[in-house]
Image (cartoon, helix red, strand yellow):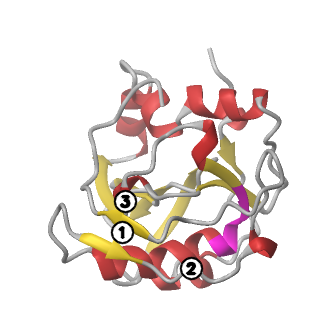
Amino acid sequence: MANLNDYTIDPAGVDWPDLLSSWAWLLPKEVAVWIVNRFGDLFLTFDDRSIHMLNIGEGSLTRLATDREQFASLIDRGNSANDWLMIPLVDRLVAAGLTLRPDECYSYIQLPILGGEYTVDNMRVVPLAHHYKAFGPIHEKLKDFPDGTHIKFDVADNKQMQRTKQGEDGASPLICVLCRPRQAVADR
């Protein structure tokens, strides 16, 4: 059985209202951050006690459970833990030498919604603040475009905000094709 702490980040001491300000277009005003996986995906408690997952790679918010008790039951079923915490991919990243400091998370070189894969080669380590503040506005701009839309980005130099296995700059591609979130894959 996996230790939850090996696949999560401690949310204590983080200024979540500031970090999530660029996600205000998707989130209700009042949410509590309960669990953070190592990719910065958030498990949020809403006012009605329901648990929702903010998936940063896909820019989606999904209701998972009516409350914490139901969530605890669901995460133990089938591949839920692997899907929600991305356990196999975390294990591969750690084996490849990508470890996290307390204020960091794994992040995407190319977002999954833009065709990026859930692989070690598409991951980098970034400060939590950069992860949320960079991807919130991107997803907000992409939310109304249909699948298959060609997207062109002007990428600024961001070498100071990321670490990769080989120390590369991890620059994102300039042209991507928008593809909507895929179903969860147990081995990612």
First along the sequence among labels 3 and 1: 1
Q: Quadrant of residue 3?
A: top right
First along the sequence among labels 1 and 2: 1
Q: Nearer the viewer, mark 1 or mark 2?
A: 2
**Which stretch did the figure color magenta?**
125-130
Query: Residue 119, image x and y in percent?
Result: 55, 37
Query: Residue 150, image x and y in percent?
Result: 26, 70
Residue indicated by mark 1:
47
Q: Nearer the viewer, mark 3 or mark 1?
A: 3
Query: Residue 17, image x and y in percent?
Result: 57, 82
Crowding at dot 2, Cα within 10 Å, few <14 / some 14-19 / many 20+, comes out as few
Q: Amino acid at mark 1?
A: Asp
Left or right for 74, reference 34 = left
Give the CA separation, mark 3 to mark 1.
32 Å
Label of residue 114 in the image: 3
Label of residue 155 in the image: 2
Left or right for 25, reference 125 = left
